[in-house]
Amino acid sequence: MAAVLTELGCWSHSWGRGIHVHQQRIYNPLMDGLWSDWTPLHEAALQGRLLLLRRLLSQGFSVCVSTVNGVTPLHEACAGGHFSCAKTLLEYGADANAVTIDGATPLLNACCSGSPALVNLILKQNSAHHPAHSLASPIHEAAKRGHVACVELLLAHGVDADLELDTGTPLYSACEAQRTDCVHTLLLLGADVNRGRGLDTPLHAAARVGGVREVSLLLQHGADGNCRNSEGKRAVELTQQHSPERLLLQATGPCSLSQLSRLCIRRSLGQHRLSKTHTLYLPHTLHNYLLYR
């Protein structure tokens, strides 16, 4: 008992600091209201303190304890990118599908932290792929942060590459954030090159932020430079005068017949059948061309 009191005694200093940061928001866990039910288990998970986490669980702290806005210790372990803490919590029965009032799941937090091992761990628990909130989803968070491996894992587990939220599709988010590698990965794995945010396409987003590499990739994958957004503007009209992306868009002509054929076949196959292109029995060279290899 004395050992437990000694171990828990460290919390008096930590809690005394009062101010913490959670998902880019400042809060005080001792304040009345949303964070008044913050527990040592939450803190241990967020800080990655595995030994203390195990001791707290062995002493009877509930693995499913949550704040009034639904934040569980598993949420915090995932937000901190702490694989061992998350694994331990799951072994004790933590809910991998727990959702906060903001729509955040452990999977979403794992994607924010950018840990492929952690994302894979949560996915193995049959975690819900789709968001409970219209402003965020795991694949959007991974895409806009440049976490390529996390994007690949999500798509391999059947997540929709073209899931469109109020903020657009994952490809649109990656273009806005100029995450070139994620843009490339999404396109290779079957994301719709012209689907963005309403009438605003990924090409509009890339042109607006000056993403010349993203513009180049989108054009290579068949982006339509003549699409007009809700303001009636084409992507080229959103670029700066004499900018590389404007010159690139102005120089782009019609697609070649081979490119049109590739785009047509890829669209017909769709995201979830691109991995089965070997069943087409194409010559090796054509198969590689179809997959942009």
Image (cartoon, rainbow, N blue to C red):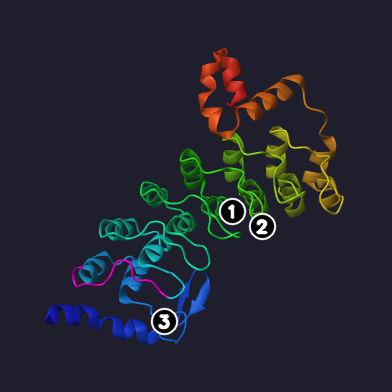
Position of 128 relative to 8 (above/below): above
Name the residue at 58% across, 16% down: 285
Q: Residues within 10 Å of mark 2 (few under 14, many from 20)?
A: few
Q: Earlier in the sequence, mark 3 or mark 2?
A: 3
- State the separation of the CA atoms marked 2 and 1: 14 Å
* Kind of residue at badge 3: Pro
The range drawn in magenta is 58-67
* Kind of residue at badge 1: Lys
Check residue 144 in the rendering and tell me which mark sits there, or answer none.
1
Check residue 166 in the rendering and tell me which mark sits there, or answer none.
2
Position of 287 relative to 1 (above/below): above
Q: Quadrant of the C terminus?
A: top right
**Can you tell which of label 3 and label 1 is closer to the viewer?**
3
Q: Main secondary structure of the magenta part?
A: loop
Residue 66 drawn in magenta: yes
Residue 261 in the image: state x and y as whole percent.
71, 21
**Which residue is the site of mark 3?**
29
